[in-house]
Amino acid sequence: MKDFEQTPPLIVHQAKGNELHTNRGVLIDAISSWWCKSLGHGHPEIIAAIQAQLSRFEHVIGANTTHEEIAELGEQIAHLTKNQHVFFASDGSSAVEIAMKLALHAKQLQGYPSRNQFISLKNSYHGETLATLSVSDLGLYKKPYEHMGVTCHVLQNIPYVSGKEDPLWTSCDHHWQATRKELEAIKENACAIIVEPLIQGAGGMLCYSADYLKKLSQYCNENDLFLIADEIMTGLGRTGKWLALEHAGVKADLICLSKGLTSGTLPLSCVSVDHFIYELFYNDYESGHSFLHSHTYSGNALAISAALATLNIMQRENSHIKAEVLGQTMEKHFIEIAQLTGKLKNVRRLGAIVAGELINENQKRIGFELYKRGLDNGALLRPLGNTLYWMPPLNCDKKTIGNLAEITLKSIKEAYT
């Protein structure tokens, strides 16, 4: 909070495409406004869909009502995720909490009430509500509230990679043996393993082995553990596949989607649910098997219309394929910046996410310095600590990436002077 005294918040006047028009000038949105603007700002088709829905109704109670748009969106998400049921919510943390509640409750219905703990990965982030913090591994966010959360075991032996060409991407047997040993000691008390598939966001844009995810999935199947895939950041084309899970060829019992679902126009999230879990709750009300979870704005009609428009555009334009092509251009520029400055190391990429570590000299907040220089030079660069990354809209063009590279290069040089 004290930083705002020296670096006041940006005042945004307008946002269009890849740009933010602010009191500091026009800025390239290099991070898709916290990773959600998959199709950029102010996409005309999405705005038109919201306006059309607004002329009919903007919101109704979600209990005992439905409408055509929410049914259509549910069908599309079920098709994309290969799960037959969809539970709508309003933001990423809510979706993860719903998935956790479903996994925990399902184990009780299966007759295993003692399986009430979770397993997550080192450096993971799953949200900032109490339950989602419990399965996260970022002390800065989590530590003050640890006594209020659920029990979670954090796996430590994660095989991090630089990308799909890294040998560990396809084979991580050594790391897996250590992980399997960890799992054997805790599996009897766990209901689920929760992961950010293949790339961890707030933990530092760390990419890990597809083989590791495949082995985790197999372990879940063999040991009656649910697999929860937190695709809040990675889902819907960002990694070059519709779901990051697809890189490993695995399916999850519960899949959480949000950020890119409406291209960041309105809050919406969902959990796609495997039919096996759904059937555990399918019973008469008097049985007490019902899943009771109802937030007021879950499945808001305006957000649903925005999501439908977003998915239709992305499927028509093959945004997941464009993401891979865009990412190759981004990686090329990132490597050049690393070579020209000597201040960026461990460059890594998956789809249209590229990241690297800023060399921290004299223990200064180099990431924060770079953020400030970026504003001066025309880009919203917002490093995670000393992790510099780009995650622009998926329909960003090569010229914009070239301009972003020039701004980033200049800003790094200035930040280190």
Image (tube, rainbow, N blue to C red):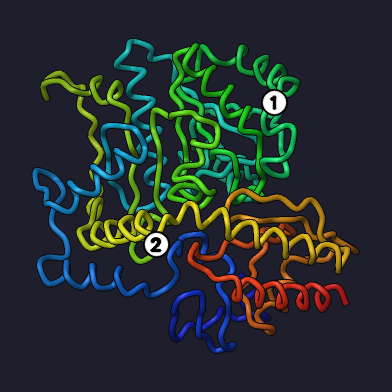
Q: In the rendered image of this protein, does residue 394 appear above or below residue 276?
A: below
Residue 370, located in which quarter of the rendered image? bottom right
Q: Which residue is mark 2?
A: 263
Q: Is residue 82 left or right of residue 220?
A: left
Residue 164, located in which quarter of the rendered image? top right
Find residue 171 and name its label.
1
Please tell me which residue is depicted at 39% across the width and 28% down the height of the picture.
Answer: 253
Q: Check disc 1 and report its element: helix, strand or loop.
A: loop
Q: Is residue 285 left or right of residue 276?
A: left
Picture coordinates of residue 211 (x, y %)? 62, 27
Nearest to the eye among marks 2 and 1: give it: 1
Q: How many marks?
A: 2
> Which amino acid type corresponds to the residue marked 1 in the rendered image?
Ser
Please tell me which residue is depicted at 23% across the width and 43% down the height of the picture.
Answer: 294
Work out which quarter of the rendered image holds the N terminus and state it: bottom right
Please tell me which residue is depicted at 79% across the width and 72% down the height of the picture.
Answer: 412
* Marks 2 and 1 close (CB-CB < 8 Å): no
Picture coordinates of residue 116 (x, y %)? 44, 21
Q: Check disc 2 and report its element: helix, strand or loop.
A: loop
> Which amino acid type corresponds to the residue marked 2 in the rendered image?
Ser
Residue 378, located in which quarter of the rendered image? bottom right
N-term-proximal mark, 2 vs 1 = 1
